[in-house]
Amino acid sequence: MLTFQRSFADGSGLGAIIADKLQRRCDVVNRGFSGYNTNLAKIILPQVFTKENLENVAGMVIMLGSNDAALKEDFKLNQHVPLVEYRKNLEDIVSYLTAHGLPKERIILVSPPPIDYDRWNVVCATELGRAFERANIDQYAHAVYEVAKAQGTLFGDLYERMTTGRDWKSDLNDGLHLGRGGAAVFVDVLWPIIERLLKPYPQVYPTWTDIDFRNPSLPPYLQLSFSEGCALGATLADKLQRRCDVVNRGFAGYNTNLAKLILPQVFTNETLENVAGMIIMFGSNDSALKEDHEWNMHVPLAEYWEN
């Protein structure tokens, strides 16, 4: 499952929430480009997504538009894209992806969230020395719906969901980027769509409560899963955007004995070939006290060390 969007602020945890919900079903790769508009997205598209890396994609979430909605001003950082051009850019992005093997039925276009203009201008004036004015985000949000309908892709209406019966300004981190509340709304919008897309992709390893830890065996991805509130994966992905992908493979309740069992299926020579680095964290489950029941995750210290 891929996401392609301008970046989310560190605090939203969106990538971590989705990865947690999809653990042992598919990898979630966030490809965020802070400050990019659809003009830039089109330019980098052939380098970011090729026929080869789109081959096994279960679905792609695309959300662009918050930067395009900047007011037109004459300075080099002005991100403004006229509404008609924005719509055409989205159509071109969808056309490129389908031409390179990703069916339109697996593409989810998402409308950008509302913007708290006053709050965002204060942030920009403080951090960048000037305001980055935005306006008419509702028109850009509606344009996404129109493109999705015309192109036959899936559609998630984040703008509508956030602005209907909610104090949506509190869902934003800084007036523009999603905070924890906004991320939760985003997941609520996406989840029914993702569930339909992933029906052919069952969970490949059992939930820890279905395992007898006294005699573990697993059918024919490495760390504990992080809770939805942690946002670690999203934070790392945001810091490493445009440098490398961050893939979280978490296994709730697994200890190092189970990790050893699944290791050959999760990591092969092929999947490790272009890995820049791997973070491994185990021990919280292994340190459970030894008790005689099937869910006891205890691993003696010497065995944990050897594992």
Image (spheres, grey):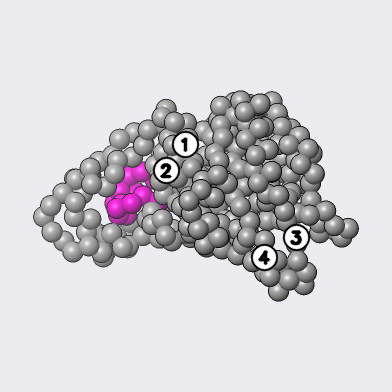
Q: CA distance from mark 1 to mark 2?
A: 9 Å
Q: Which residue is mark 1?
A: 194
Disc with the residue nearer the chain's start (3 vs 2) = 2
Q: Residue at x 76, y 41 (%)?
A: 83
Task: Between label 2 and label 4, give the one nearer the viewer.
Answer: 4
Tell me what residue is drawn at x 58 percent, y 46 percent.
159
The x and y percentages for residue 306 are 32, 59
Badge 4, how many Cα within 10 Å: few under 14, some, many 20+?
few
Q: Secondary structure at mark 1?
A: helix
**Is 156 within the magenta?**
no
Q: Looking at this view, name the residue that lies furthest to the front.
A: 165
Q: Which residue is mark 2?
A: 22
Disc 1 and disc 2 in contact, CB within 8 angstroms: yes
Distance in Å between CA atoms under marks 3 and 2: 37 Å
Residue 126 percent coordinates (x, y): 71, 74
Question: Earlier along the polypeptide chain: callout 1 or callout 2?
Answer: 2
Amino acid type, label 2: Leu
Q: Which residue is mark 3?
A: 133
Q: Earlier in the sequence, mark 2 or mark 4?
A: 2
Q: Is residue 78 visible?
A: yes
In the rendered view, tell whether residue 278 sits above or below residue 190. below
**Marks 1 and 2: which is nearer the front?**
1
Crowd class of label 3 (few under 14; some 14 to 19; many from 20; radius 10 Å) = some
Measured in 3D between alpha carbons, the distance from the residue under mark 3 to the one under mark 1, in whole angstroms, is 34 Å
Distance Cα–Cα, label 3 vs label 4: 9 Å
Eyeballing the image, is 161 above or below 145? below
Badge 3 marks a residue whose secondary structure is loop
For disc 4, the marked residue is 118
Give the alpha-carbon distance from disc 4 to disc 1, as whole Å. Answer: 34 Å
Marks 2/4: CA–CA distance: 36 Å
Which stretch is magenta? Answer: 250-263
Q: Amino acid at mark 1?
A: Ile
